[in-house]
Image (spheres, rainbow, N blue to C red):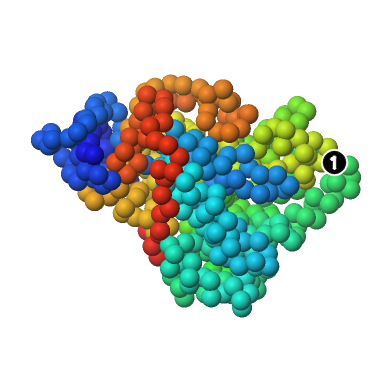
Amino acid sequence: MSTLIKNGRVVTATDAYVADIFIEGETIAAIGKNLQVNAEQAIDATGKLVFPGGIDPHVHLDLPFMGTYSSDNYETGSTAALFGGTTTLIDFAIQTQGQSMQSAVDEWNKKSEGNSLCDYSYHLAVTDYNPDTRPEVKKLIEQGITSFKTFMAYKGALMVDDGQMVGLMHEVKEQGGLVTVHATNGDMIDHLIAKHRGEGKMAPLYHYLSQPEVTEAEASGRFVDMAHYTDVPAYIVHMTCEGALNQIRQATRRNQKVFVETCIQYLLLDASLYESEGFEGSKWVMSPPLRQKKDQETLWAGLNQGLVQVVGTDHCPFYIKQKRMGEHDFSKIPNGHPAIEHRVELLYSEGVEKGRISINKFVEATSTNAAKIFGMFPKKGTIAVDSDADIIIFDPKEKHAISAKTHHHNCDYSGYEGWEVTGKTKTVLLRGKVVIENGGTKVNKGYGQFIKRGHSSKVI
């Protein structure tokens, strides 16, 4: 199949220009003014922006967590992703303590294969690093799983100690991979949870108060120091606050580079939502929690300063009835909220349209940097000859409101209900095929492919 996209304003991380894009099969064959080619279909993109397909490197689909499962599976979650302009996602295959890392990949393959509409890959979440699992790092990297997630919280289930962390870092460094981290101080958080429960403080607000900024700042600094010692490529997921970002600023003084991801909710929402009436605050119970207005300002600045490279979502939705598992005890509220469909449009509307970031920075944060950091560039993350034809055709002027009544998440609420947005994803192509058009999907589940990723880099 060949496609000609005509007269759109093509925007990459470095350029913006009006041009035609000619696609043959799954890849871009030519870019230029007034291309004279014979295409089987033509798309008029006059007045539209043409972006590389979004890459969300932080999602949790069909995740077993806190006695339930996240409500989006690969079919529903990837559908929502495509509607929002995300064409590739990276999920977390989570090792069960006492079992192999490969068993986690095998389990996640059962969830994804034949079900995803968009392209996907995995990070391997390491919960049990020991001499028996160490050789698996090399084998997984050979399979194209080149990033390894660690948790500094959730003791007894996900958390690794500092000895395991350093051991994993040494091995991943040797094999050419990257270590990512959930950086919060689990011991301190567990202490505060127990303290608040002991005092009978059970409302959603106390989820937030059990994870103060210092818990994230301390853990981020500790992780950065271990990464500096081992010289491993390192990436902090879902950073939320000034204290944590200041650890990155400090690391630059010794010429260290650590990649940082924030999430759309931390740029736009704040902790006042936890004081909503009744149980309403549970909608925004996530870890780390929402922070203060000053932290939003810090994260926007971090994007412009090049200290924050990626905006993801930590998409992990639950129905309200699932949230109600913690109606009388905040510590039992499943952590997470729906976001994958709205990341691209919200960041454009609140970032580009309001002058907080440039349009090129927007493309970096939603696509290009994730592709580079996680070993997919230049096949993905840009619009260039020989790149995969993963393309968003975006109307920068269309206004609309976000609502659970219209979103495609398998979730009965939206964390952004009624939010007025300027800019809308209109048409989406994945590997040269139109997958979203006129408000509908044009492919069936199973079109999405597993992406075998290359080695990670310490620089982008």
Q: Where is residue 403 drawn, in percent x and y? A: 56, 24
In the displayed structure, would residue 147 be above or below residue 84? below
In the displayed structure, would residue 430 be above or below residue 94? above
The residue tagged 1 is 201
Residue sitting at 62 percent across and 48 percent down? 63
Please state which amino acid type lies under the numbered disc 1.
Lys
Q: Report the front residue among 164 and 441.
A: 441
As drawn, is 217 to the left or to the right of 79?
right
Total of numbered circles in the picture?
1
Residue sitting at 41 percent across and 27 percent down? 440
Location of the N terminus (image quadrant): top left
Where on the picture, by quarter, is residue 424? top left
Residue sitting at 58 percent across and 37 percent down? 338
Residue sitting at 63 percent across and 59 percent down? 151
Q: Where is residue 280 drawn, in percent x and y? A: 72, 30
Where on the picture, by quarter, is residue 105? bottom right
- Outermost residue on the left side: it is 36
Task: Give the class, few, some or many, for how many residues have Cα within 10 Å of label 1's Cα (few <14, many ≥20).
Answer: some
Q: Where is residue 265 drawn, in percent x and y? A: 56, 39
Where on the picture, by quarter, is residue 183? bottom right
Q: Does the rendering let one see residue 405?
A: yes
Q: Does the rendering let one see residue 291?
A: no
Of helix, strand and loop, which one carries label 1? Answer: loop
